[in-house]
Image (cartoon, helix red, strand yellow):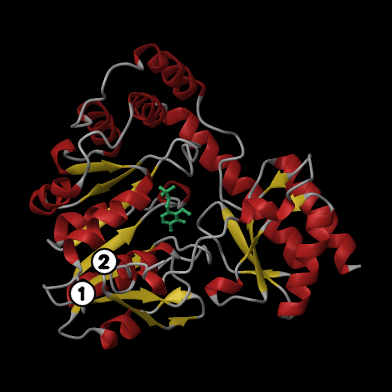
Amino acid sequence: MGEIIPPQPGIMNIALYVSGESQLAGQTEVLKLSANENPYGPSAAAKAAYAAASGELHRYPATDHAPLRAAIGEVYGLDPARIICGVGSDEVLQFITQCYAGPGDEVITTRHGFSMYPILAHAAGAVPVEVDEAERVVDVDAILAAVTPRTRIVFIANPANPTGTMLEEGELQRLARELPPSVLLVHDGAYTEYADGFDGGVSLVEEFPNVIMTRTFSKIYGLGGLRIGWGYARQEIIDVLNRVRQPFNLSNGQMAAAEAAVRDVEYTRWCASENARWRDWLRAALEQMGVGCDESHANFLLARFDSPAEAEACDAALRAAGILVRKVGGYQLPDCLRITVGDEDACRRIVAVIAKFKG
Ligand code: PMP
């Protein structure tokens, strides 16, 4: 018998993550539009590079990710020395919280912000402080008003998940400018490549010393299954984050696939343009059926129903038709469903089911 040892403070405030995947267990033909994956998959070059890397399974990977950082640096026009790579951007976000927030510190997140932010704050023993948004868009004044001497980090996703909205450029600048220098601003750009003409926070990082941007290979690069992400900041910040990074956090296969993927610029562009085309089509079709959507700058739409009950019933109808979307009640959006923009066939299929549901 005896007592079970308690965990560190804050850990029990974290609800266990339940994957959306299990919701359609038992159905064979599932159309998955619930995880914002690229419906076209990774580039052929990435798949080939991954396969080639399997010949070296007995070799430890490089600890410094130099070829991958060089490729990212070339394609995005960044200094490779100021890039850090992680197991998904989730891991980079974890490095940040682990290094910059501790017990009793406050970490600001926004009302419909990405679910990992409060989890990471709790895991560091810090207190997540959630502030309101204005019409499902990050509200800079609300963030600034919530800052206290204990605030260490502000997290924003831009474009945001699950809303797909973006903070206006001037507002983003104002946030970085008006935050106290003792607060780190994390600009999470997981969906940047879908946001036409947006630099994903690069200019912000270059201008303000306490901004870090994070990016991922899980979305437009179609490598969610491999888990690769990266961050970019001032050298001093990257040097701090590298202290907590495990030396062999990325495998040979992860690095090879990511490097080939990022270099296949033409394929990335094609994915972005297909997404924009079908996102617009899907949004127009939904709106015609009375299902409103905010303008999305990402690869999903937040579809708003008349009530939580209607959203729930539509989700059930979609599931019965073998289509999995994301319920976002946990994000305080119970009247909404988040729908990943699939390929043409997927978009037509989901519209047909929703049209029948709406009658
Ligand atoms: N940030 C945002 C806003 C996301 O939506 C996601 C994925 N859902 C992530 C970060 C994490 O992505 P990954 O760990 O796969 O890079």
Judging depth in this view, the residue of 349 and 167 nearest the camera is: 349
Q: Quadrant of the N terminus?
A: bottom left
Q: Which residue is mark 2?
A: 124
* Rendered image quadrant of residue 104: bottom left
Would you say 51 lies left or right of 248 here?
right
Residue closest to the eye, 251 or 1: 1
- Quadrant assignment for the C terminus: bottom right
Q: Residue furthest top?
A: 55
Q: Between residue 40 and residue 242, name the one nearer to us.
A: 242
Depicted 170 relative to depicted 23: above or below:
below
Residue at left 73%, top 67%? 287
Q: Residue at x 16, y 45 (%)?
A: 242
Residue type at tag 2: Ala
Q: Is residue 15 above or below residue 242?
A: below
Give the residue at the far left of this rendering: 236
Residue 250 vs 243, above or below: the answer is: above
Q: Position of residue 266 (x, y in %)?
A: 46, 29
**Label drawn at residue 103:** 1
